[in-house]
Amino acid sequence: MNEMTKMPDTKPAHGKNAKDDMKSGVSAEIEGVCVYCGSGKGVDTAYAIAARKLGKALADSGIRLIYGGGSLGLMGEVARSALGAGGKVTGIIPEFLGSREHMLQDVDELIVVENMHVRKQLMFDRADAFVALPGGVGTLEELVEQLTWSQLGRHTKPIVVANINGFWNPFLNLLEHMKAETFIRAGLDIHFTVVDKAEDILPAILRSAKPQAPADAEDVVRKF
């Protein structure tokens, strides 16, 4: 590990305010991708294989991996794969999870924060796109938060759901049910891409990375 930072919850992330980042929209250039995934490996070995493929793909493309900082499960798989391929990795982890998730000390940048809120905000600030690999409730929460922010026009960064061996099918069905019941309605669509294979994740991100200013807050309010 080359750099370790302990960041209090009052310090802005990455030299810029999160609100400024949200207002700025997304650049077509992808420099960092945030990967949400489980601290376990799951039953299906395809999940770990997908995590390793994604880590290597990011490294081979010169794109920094931003993730939750742990060494266990799919988190460890994607991070070690990126590092093994010569990639850059930023781990962001709350202090209280350091021992539970066995923070990975080998990353070139490890940021220890005060709480989960700061962790998620920093991950957002550092990333130009988001990927959800299989995971648990925490992974689901992080994915849904980015979908919500996108739905409300707070960012236009690409979001990719890696539906490895149909893992996310129940969630995708739930979204369709919400749409059928008009809780997701015209003007408040959710924008994301679903891929079935790890090899398709990075191409999907690059296709989706188009400069676009987010909607004005008043326009968002008028949609409700």
Image: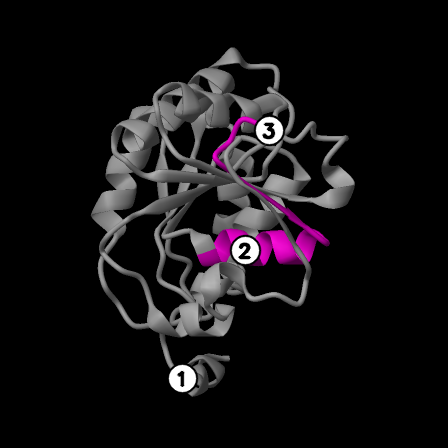
Q: Which mark is residue 122?
A: 2
| Residue where numbered disc 3 is placed | 105
Q: CA distance from mark 3 to mark 1?
A: 44 Å
Three-letter code, disc 3: Gln
- Residue 58 against residue 30 in the figure, above or below: above
Three-letter code, disc 1: Asp
Asked whether, in this view, residue 64 is left or right of residue 93, the answer is left
Q: Is residue 141 visible?
A: yes
Of circles 3 and 1, the one toward us is: 3
Q: Earlier in the sequence, mark 1 or mark 2?
A: 2
Q: At 45% from the left edge and 82% from the top edge, which residue is drawn? A: 217
**How packed is label 2: few (under 14 Cα within 10 Å), some, or many (20 or more)?**
many
Q: At 38% from the left edge and 72% from the top edge, which residue is drawn? A: 187
Q: Which residues are magenta?
A: 104-125
Residue 45 % position (x, y): 52, 12
In the structure shown, which secondary structural element does the residue marked by tag 2 occupy? helix
Q: Nearer the viewer, residue 125 or 168?
A: 125
Residue 33 % position (x, y): 39, 43
Q: Are marks 3 and 1 in contact (CB under 8 Å)?
A: no
| Residue where numbered disc 1 is placed | 219
Q: Nearer the viewer, residue 36 or 46?
A: 36
Quarter holding residue 103: top right
State the colouring used for the structure image: one colour
Of circles 2 and 3, the one toward us is: 3
**How packed is label 1: few (under 14 Cα within 10 Å), some, or many (20 or more)?**
few
